[in-house]
Amino acid sequence: MGADPWGFDEERQVLARKLVTKRRRYAWSHTGVLLVFLFVLLAGWGISLRMWADSLRLPGWAASTVFLVVLYGIGSALGWPYDYLGGYRLDRGFGLSTQSARSWVLDRAKSFALGLAAVVLAGDVLLWLLATQPTWWWLLAWALGLAVTVVLTFLAPVVLAPIFYKFRPLQDPALRARFEALAAKAGVPVIGVFEMGASAKTRRTNAMVVGLGRTRRIVVTDTMLGGFTPEETESVLAHELGHQRFSDLPEGVLVGALLSFVMWSLGGWAYAATYPALGFASLGDMAGLPLLLLWTGLVSTALGPLELGWSRRREARADRFALELTRDPTAFASAMVRLTDGNLGLAHPRPWERWLLYSHPPGRERVEAARRSGDRESGAS
C-alpha cells in the first residue's frame, strides 16, 4: 500500500476504519447498558432508592446528595469496562496511546471526582428549582447552565487542563516568536505560547488557541512540535486563530445556549407531562431525575446533527482563513494529512457518518479545499 490521490496513507486509513468500527461497537454497547440501567430506575428501582435515602433521616439536601452519589457511582462503574476496553486498550493496541495503566487509572479517578462534584452540585440545585419553581424551573436551570459554561470557557485552560497534562512556556525562542507573529498578523492578541506534554500519554498531535481575553494562549503539543514542520504547525495554528478572529468561541456558546434552551424547554415539558404516570410523588421527586435525563437526552440527540452541521461550516471558514493567512496551501494540505493519518482519523467517512458524527470537515475535503486554494493562487499569478 502507498498514498492515495489525496496523500493519505492507505494502510493507516485501513487501520482507521478498523479502529472506528471497534470503538463504535463498544460505544453502542455502552449506550445500551446505560439505557437498560435507566429503564430499571424508571421501572421502580429509582423510587426504592429514594425511599432508602429518605429512611436515613438526613436533611433534604443530604438525602438527595446520597441519592445522586449512588446513581453516579453505579452509572460510572457500568462505563468503566468500556472506557478501558474501548478506550485505553484500543488506543494501546492501535499504537495511539503511550500512557501507563497506572497513569490511566489516575486520570479516570480525577475525571470521576470532577464529574461526581459536578453531578452532585447540579443535581441538588436542579431538585431545589423543581421544588420551589414548578413553572419556570427549566428556564432557571438553562440560565444557570449557560452561566457555568461561560465561566468554564475562561477557566478551563487555566484550571482544568493542567489537572491532566503538564504545560510549560515554549522553550524555542525562534519558534515562539514565529507563532506570536502569526497571532499578531491574524489580529489575535495572546498572552504566550505554551507546550503541552502530550507524549507521556498519547501519540496524537494537536495545536490550539484556548481561552478568552486575558486567558487566551497558544498551546502546541510536544508530539506536534516533534513531528510537524514549522510551516505545518503554523497552518494548524492559523486555523485556530481563525476561530478567535471570527469570535467562534462566543458564537459557539450562543449556539449552544439556543440549542440547550430548546432541550430544556421541550425536555422539561415532556417530563412534566409524564412523571405522574410513572408514580413519582411530585415534580421535584429525586427519583424522577432519570426520566428528566431521558427526555432531555432524546431532545439533545435529535438536535445533534444541526449543531454538527453548524460546526462543520464554522470549521471550513477557519480553514479558509488559515489558507488566506499563511498563503501556503501545500503546508496546510500536508498538515491535514499528518493530523488525520497520525491520529487514525477517517479521511473519507461515509455520508451518514459525516452527517451524524463529524464536527469538522473530513480530511479529504480539507485537502481538496487547500488544493483549490493553490489553484486559484496559481491562476491569479
Image: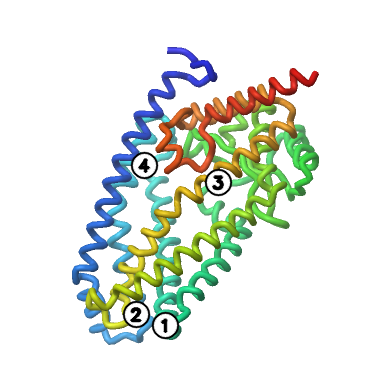
Q: Amino acid at mark 2?
A: Leu
Q: CA distance from mark 2 to mark 1?
A: 7 Å
Task: In the rendered structure, find residue 87 and report the number of the disc placed on it.
Answer: 4
- Residue 167 location in percent, x, y? 61, 46
Distance in Å between CA atoms under marks 3 and 2:
35 Å
The residue to which callout 2 is attached is 283
Looking at this view, is 55 or 258 the one in front? 258
Quadrant containing the N terminus is top left
Residue flagged by tag 1: what amino acid is it?
A: Pro
Sequence order check, earlier mark of 1 and 4: 4
Q: Residue type at mark 4: give it.
A: Gly
Q: Which residue is mark 1?
A: 134
Is 332 situated above or below 245? above
Q: Which secondary structure lies at badge 2?
A: loop
Residue situated furthest top in the rendering:
1
- Callout 3 amino acid: Ser
Dot placed on the residue nearer the N-terminal end, 2 or 4: 4
The crowding category of the residue bearing disc 1, from other C-alpha atoms within 10 Å (few below 14, some 14 to 19, many at least 20), is some
